[in-house]
Image (spheres, rainbow, N blue to C red):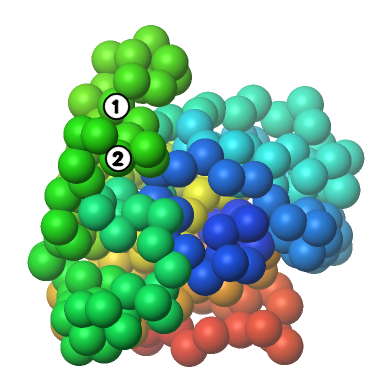
Amino acid sequence: MTRLALIRHGQSQWNLENRFTGWVDVDLTDKGRAEAEKAGELLAAEDGEFSACYTSVQKRAIRTLWMVLDKMDRMWLPVTRDWRLNERHYGGLTGLDKAETAEKHGADQVKIWRRSYDTPPPPLEADNPHDMSNDLRYRALGVTVPKSESLKLTLDRVTPCFDAEIAPKLNDGKSLIIAAHGNSLRALVKLLMNVSDDDIVNLEIPTGNPLVMDFEPGTVNPTAVRYLDESRAQSLPPIP
């Protein structure tokens, strides 16, 4: 059986502070580190072996993967860091307190920016202190940092990574771990489970709780999907 483990990074400092994070490179809280360690313990207790790992170029996801692999005693597994697995860019909402933003713009408008499939938030202004366009990692990678993204735009950049990197390995029977972010993982779930545009907006992936998919070798069609920590599981779309 081929297996894919999707792990949203542990709680970050801005998760704790209820702020829109996006591409800002905040780190894990102590709780987030504990969640990452727990994820590693849960995966270590599973049958089967993993062949390779993927993560974004953001430290909260990278550190989560480090801690997961440490707990699994699998730090030697090859790791690919790909910016296309970054969190969704929240544009002009970046850094703002979510409750205060709802008070200012109205809860209905903020819900559209946060949860709609194809409506991005207002773009980030060039003089915003959270502008990452001159960040060394993106200049080195030749990446044009977006000004704002919807979930659809996030899916548009995740899909080539999936098609070129992830799907071929799953088709070859290689089990993988992906440590990334709420929205890039939602994009992957949409691809793998053929979730509709309307239904994907209701999917919430908890931090630090491995979402494991099983596949018949030679396919990218999951036959079983489950969270390893049932006490923190969220509802999942049906298997197509």
Image spot of residue 87 (x, y percent): 40, 50
Judging from the image, what secondary structure is the residue with disc 1 in?
A: loop
Image spot of residue 147 (x, y percent): 19, 42
Q: Camera-side residue: 148 or 76?
A: 148
* Residue bearing mark 1: 133
Q: Amino acid at mark 2?
A: Asn
Q: Residues within 10 Å of mark 1 (few under 14, many from 20)?
A: some
Q: Is residue 124 visible?
A: yes
Q: How many marks?
A: 2
- Farthest residue toward the top? 140
Residue at image position (22%, 26%) is: 144
Q: Which mark is residue 105?
A: none
Q: Is residue 143 above or below residue 233?
A: above
Image spot of residue 128 (x, y percent): 30, 40
Decide if residue 60 is on the left or right side of residue 225.
Answer: right
Q: Amino acid at mark 1?
A: Ser
Image spot of residue 18 (x, y percent): 52, 70
Q: Camera-side residue: 19 or 228?
A: 19
> Could you give the CA–CA distance between mark 2 and mark 1, rounded to whole angstroms?
11 Å
Q: Earlier in the sequence, mark 2 or mark 1?
A: 2
Residue at image position (28%, 15%) is: 142
Q: Camera-side residue: 185 or 116?
A: 116
Decide if residue 100 is on the left or right side of residue 164.
Answer: right
Residue at image position (71%, 30%) is: 77
Q: Which mark is residue 128?
A: 2
